[in-house]
Amino acid sequence: QMQLVESGGGLVQAGGSLRLSCVASEDSVRLGTMGWYRQGLGEQRVMVATISRMGSTNYADVVKGRFTVSKDNAKSTVYLQMNSLKPEDTAVYYCYAQKIFSTRDYWGKGTQVTVSS
């Protein structure tokens, strides 16, 4: 079992910034794609940004140019830098990861991000 622990959520005004962090309990050599999903109230969980084992990134159109996903292999940690936040970015943000040679999805418990107008 791999554990993912998120941190960095909170309340911010529109136009502000937050950085989310997620630490995996697995050594980075065993990690595959990692990233972030979010789920607004009454909505489905959707992809925000992912980063592959080789560092290729993928973003949802609604966050392109505002959010940046990155990782620190030495710390088995993935980050989500969120700038120019909008009220519609309000959601619970979930860390996501896969192990290499596996299709099983692992999820963190989520961290709340609230953007006030």
Image (cartoon, rainbow, N blue to C red):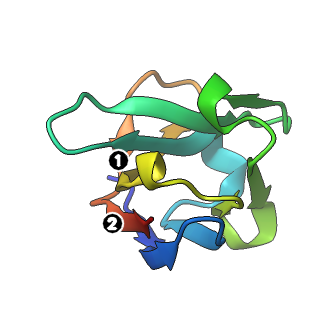
**64 relative to 108 in the view: left or right:** right
Residue at x 38%, y 55% (from the top left corner): 90
- What residue is disc 1 on? 107
Badge number at residue 112: 2
On the image, the x and y values in percent for residue 115 come to 44, 65
Q: Amino acid type of disc 2? A: Gln
In this rendering, does residue 60 appear at all? no
Q: Which mark is residue 16?
A: none
Instruction: Provide residue 94's location: percent of width, then percent of height.
Output: 39, 51
Report the Cα–Cα distance between label 1 and label 2.
15 Å
Residue 65 quadrant: top right
Element on which disc 1 rests: strand
When the figure is inspected, residue 92 is found, relative to residue 105, above or below; the finding is below
Depth check, front residue: 111 or 106:
111
Picture layout, residue 13 above or below residue 31: below
Label 2, residues with CA under 10 Å away: few <14, some 14-19, many ≥20? some
Between 52 and 89, the one lying in front of the other is 89
* Number of on-image labels: 2
* Residue that extends furthest to the left in the rendered view of this protein: 42
Quarter of the image where one finds residue 50? top right
Crowd band around label 1 with a 10 angstrom C-alpha radius: few (<14), some (14–19), many (20+):
many
Q: Position of residue 30 (x, y in %)?
A: 63, 46
Q: Position of residue 37 (x, y in %)?
A: 45, 40
Q: Is residue 82 left or right of residue 25?
A: right
- Which corner quadrant holds the C terminus? bottom left
Which one is in front, 99 or 114? Answer: 114
Rendered position, 46 above or below 111 = above
User: What type is the residue that disc 1 sits on?
Assistant: Trp
